[in-house]
Image (cartoon, grey):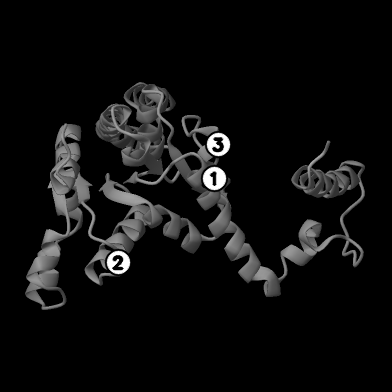
Amino acid sequence: METTQDLKERRLADAWAELQAHANNGHPLQADAYRLAFADPEFMLRRETRGIRFQLEMLKPDLAQQELGIENTVVVFGSARFRDPVESAELLQRAERSGNAQDIARAKSLVRNAHYYEQARTFARIVALYSKSCETEDRLFICTGGGPGIMEAANRGAHDEGALNVGLNIALPHEQMANPYVSPELSFKFHYFALRKMHFMMRAKALVAFPGGFGTLDELFEVITLVQCKKAKPVPIVLFGSDYWKRLLNLEVLLEEGTISPDDLNLFEYVDEPAAAWDAIARFYNLKT
């Protein structure tokens, strides 16, 4: 006998199937007062329903992660443009054959930075291996922005060990697809950057930032600010690649000019090896490794 819950779910599915069939038959969707509100795209995309969309983007990933026991994550940020060593070498060969100076310079930078891809992958494998021996509630799960580059590398490292891992992707004008190593049941897509950032922090027990661009800097400084202002619990914040970060950020200037306190420079630390990044996390939580 069909339960009440089954009946409700079937009716919801039927409403969406009817809407999809309408579109598949070549009929453009027009505003329709009789359509069920939750299955009415025109209504759901109105400015007045933005708050509802916020709630949905908050709730969907939260419920899915709860159901799979994802309570503690290690968030890995970094450039979406870096590639693995093999692909980087192939791109350089192709660029050199083309003779285009800009393409050659870009490809050389990919080759130069390809080691970060391998290091992110190795770091994620270390996390996944540690978690295999833990009770479910104590496991640490890799979480990234779900895209290519360093994000792919970290998801790939967890995937190598058969571990569930999370991808919090974002809809962009130049369509960004989730990388193939994110666990399908934990591959989420966001419209709102703010909600995506909130999900990064909700379960984060550590942040590891590899070299990256504006997006990486934005995410890094948001976390540092939240911890500095005590809006988030202290977590280990690890900057991977000391040469890169120290060339990019002269944070001592902030101290010299009195815009931060001396202790604020202790909110993060630099490392250059995957094992050192893991040691920083294990030391912070007194984990037995």
CB-based contact (under 8 Å), mark 3 and mark 1: yes
**90 left or right of 126?**
right
Residue 132: % across, % down: 32, 27
Q: Amino acid at mark 2?
A: Leu
Q: Residues within 10 Å of mark 2 (few under 14, many from 20)?
A: some
Viewer-side label of 1, 2: 1
Name the mark on residue 211.
Answer: none
Q: Amino acid at mark 3?
A: Glu
SS at mark 1 in the image: helix
Q: Residue at x 82, y 39 (%)?
A: 2
Q: Residue at x 10, y 77 (%)?
A: 257
Residue hosting label 3: 185
The N terminus is located in which quarter? top right
Q: Is residue 162 above or below residue 282?
A: above
**70 left or right of 248?**
right
Residue 110: % across, % down: 32, 34
Residue hosting label 2: 226
First in residue order: circle 3 vs circle 1:
1
Which of 160/129 is in front? 129
